[in-house]
Each structure stands twice: as structure tokens, then as C-alpha cells.
Image: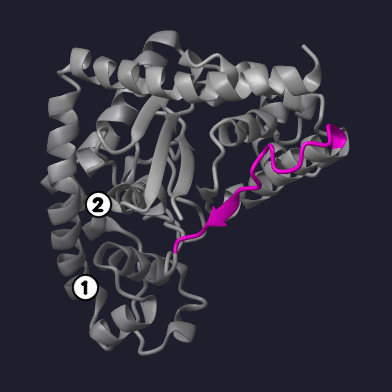
């Protein structure tokens, strides 16, 4: 059976190794599988839940598309578009917000984390954006959604909204109930400077992340300076439990080489990290440097990137507008 896959990436700029291994690398595999129909959305509506510089946002939208293409996503096989250009997303989000319950949204832990202590100053959009995410998914009869641990709760909310709509309006199976698509053998990528913090573009030190636009020398330097400990590489995964930086570097190696963490550890057991870091640097350079070169090349071809988005938006709008018309009929508009 053909899987219909939807996933979105926020155009925040400076996508990094964590984004690549956590999402984009998987997108490429899904794109290349003929059993899948993939829709990859640049979720610019989600981006404005926090303040954005309009000029930077516009550039970041193009950079996200350039990163998709440079990483190997084929626009002839998959739909690539930006959310704001398909009005059905905003319209469906409003209708579904009248289905979603306050109690459901109050349980969303990501809002609590992002809003911090002073929730009164957070935007309404930041609070309700999981409903927009549900609209994104449900408009395309999505069967599967690639998710990490931080988005599982939002997908559960999406499923709840879909089921409530179907039940309230007595339209069984109108909204498909999407299933999570979770990467096997994937470890969350952490900061190179602190193995307890997620790799992030918001980290003050650029040494904490490998950007997808980094050049060879930058990659090598960052891995050389990455935090480790003085112990050699162990022989068992359990021995990494209290060694977060060691686990992180070995997890990066495992994800890049498609090996399990256990097999990666066995391969380097007893060796010191200075030797391992040299090998990891070379693998990173082989994987990331060609992407970096291609991103920079594509960013000089703005008309081409805009053409990809325009074509993707037309295709997405064709699908979404049909679904929203059916929603109108069901709701009584």
C-alpha cells in the first residue's frame, strides 16, 4: 500500500547536523522509496509563532529548500512547498481549533518549555500551533508522519482531533488517522560542548554544532575541540550511561554509517578519542562537505529555488483545496 508521508521543517536558518541526522537524512530515504508519496513542507507559518525578521525569514525559506535539494530530495518525486502559500492550512487550522479542546492543548509540554516561566507573554500562536500542525497533516490524507520524541505528543493531539471531527460529524474515516514513523537505531544528536543539551542553532557557541554549511576545516576543528573525557572507548553500551559526550560522538558515527551504537562501540573499543575523532572528522567531511558546497551554489540560484516552491505550492494547493471544500460541506458552510 502506498504510504502518504507529510513532514515539515521550520525555516530557522543554519540547519545543522542534528537536523540532518534527525530528519533530512530520513527524508531522503523516504523520497527514494517508490512505496511512498512524500510531501515536505517549509512551515513558515509555524516560524512566526516567535518574532522573525521578514528579510531573514524569506532567505531562510530558500535556504531550507536548498538544504532539501542538496541533501538529495528530488522535487520530481516529492512535493516541496512553503505552508503560507497554501491558504487551506490556515483555514483548516481555524476549523480544527474549534474541534480541539483547551485541556488537550494545556497538556502540550513543548509550549511549557518554549514559553518558559512567563507564559502570559507567549503568543497565542505558540500555544495553538499544534492545531495548525494537525491541519498540515490531515489536509493531505497523510498515513505516516516521521516524528522524533519531541513531536510525538503533537501527533497524538492530531489523531485526537481527527477522531473527534469524524465522530462529531459522523463521517467515519474522513480524516485518516496518521501513524508515527520513527527512525530505527537513531540517537538524539547533542551539543559538541555539552552532551546533556540538544544540538541547537540557538547555542551561543558555534563550536557546539556542525552546520550544514560548514567547510572542511570548520568541521575538523569542531570535532577536534568537541568535549570528551579521558577514558578510552568502552566495549558495552551500558558503560556510556554516565559519559554523555562520549555517547554523543559515538552516536553521530553510528548514525552517519548506519551502524548500531553497539557495533560502533565494538569497532573502536579500547581506542582513545583522539584517534576516533580523526576518523569521525573524515566521515563527517565526506558526508557534509558536498551538501555544504551544493547549498551555497543553490543559494545563488534564487529563481530556481522559487520555481521549485511555486510548482510545489500549486501541487499542494490542488490537493488541500479539494479537502477543504469537503470540510466546508461537512461543517455546513
- Front residue of 225/60: it is 60
Q: Earlier in the sequence, mark 2 or mark 1?
A: 2
Q: Secondary structure at mark 2?
A: helix
From where the camera sits, is residue 123 visible?
no
Q: Is residue 175 magenta?
A: yes
Q: CA distance from mark 2 to mark 1?
A: 14 Å
Question: Residue 134's x, y, as percent?
Answer: 64, 35
- Residue 94 versus residue 241 in the image, above or below: above
Q: Which quadrant is home to the C terminus?
A: top right
**Is 106 situated above or below 64?**
below
Viewer-nearest residue: 244 or 111:
111
Between 144 and 127, the one lying in front of the other is: 144
| Residue for point 37% across, 67% down | 251
- Which residue does the image show at 83% across and 32% down from the upper left? 169
Residues at marks 2 and 1 touching, judged by CB atoms closer than 8 Å: no
Q: Give the main secondary structure of the magenta stretch.
A: loop
Mark 1 Cα shell of 10 Å, populated few (<14), some (14-19), many (≥20): some
Q: Which residue is mark 2?
A: 222
Residue 40 appears left or right of 110: left
Magenta residues span: 168-183
> What is the x, y in percent for residue 293?
12, 36
Circle 1 residue = 276
Amino acid at each position: 500500500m502506498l504510504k502518504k508521508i507529510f513532514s515539515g521543517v521550520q525555516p530557522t536558518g543554519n540547519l545543522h547536523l542534528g537536523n540532518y541526522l534527525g530528519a533530512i537524512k530520513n527524508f531522503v530515504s523516504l523520497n527514494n522509496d517508490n512505496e511512498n508519496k512524500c510531501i515536505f513542507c517549509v512551515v513558515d507559518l509555524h516560524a512566526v509563532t516567535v518574532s522573525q525578521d521578514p528579510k531573514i525569514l524569506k532567505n531562510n525559506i530558500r535556504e531550507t529548500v536548498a538544504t532539501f535539494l542538496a541533501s538529495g530530495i528530488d522535487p520530481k518525486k516529492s512535493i516541496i512547498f512553503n505552508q503560507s502559500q497554501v491558504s487551506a492550512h490556515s483555514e483548516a487550522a481555524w476549523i480544527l481549533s474549534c474541534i480541539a479542546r483547551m485541556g488537550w492543548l494545556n497538556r502540550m509540554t513543548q509550549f511549557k518549555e518554549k514559553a518558559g516561566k512567563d507564559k502570559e507573554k507567549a503568543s497565542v500562536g505558540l500555544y495553538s500551533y499544534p492545531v495548525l500542525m494537525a491541519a498540515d497533516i490531515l489536509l493531505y490524507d497523510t498515513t505516516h508522519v516521521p516524528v522524533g520524541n519531541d513531536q510525538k505528543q503533537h501527533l497524538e493531539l492530531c489523531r485526537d482531533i481527527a477522531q473527534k471531527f469524524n465522530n462529531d460529524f459522523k463521517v467515519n474515516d474522513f480524516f485518516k488517522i496518521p501513524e508515527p514513523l520513527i527512525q530505527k537505531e537513531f540517537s538524539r544528536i547533542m551539543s559538541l560542548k555539552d552532551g546533556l543539551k540538544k544540538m541547537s542553532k540557538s547555542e551561543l557557541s558555534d563550536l557546539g554544532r556542525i552546520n550544514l554549511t560548514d567547510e572542511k576545516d570548520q568541521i575538523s576543528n569542531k570535532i577536534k575541540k568537541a568535549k570528551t573525557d579521558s577514558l578510552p572507548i568502552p566495549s558495552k553500551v551500558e558503560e556510556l550511561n554516565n559519559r554523555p559526550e562520549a555517547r554523543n560522538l559515538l552516536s553521530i558515527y553510528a548514525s552517519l554509517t548506519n551502524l548500531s551504537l553497539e557495533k560502533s562501540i565494538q569497532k573502536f573499543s579500547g581506542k582513545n578519542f583522539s584517534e576516533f575523532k580523526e576518523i569521525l572528522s573524515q566521515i563527517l567531511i565526506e558526508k557534509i562537505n558536498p551538501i555544504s558546497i551544493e547549498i551555497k551554489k543553490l543559494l545563488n540560484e534564487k529563481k530556481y529555488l522559487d520555481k521549485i516552491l511555486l510548482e510545489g505550492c500549486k501541487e499542494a494547493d490542488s490537493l488541500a483545496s479539494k479537502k477543504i471544500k469537503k470540510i466546508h460541506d461537512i461543517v455546513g458552510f
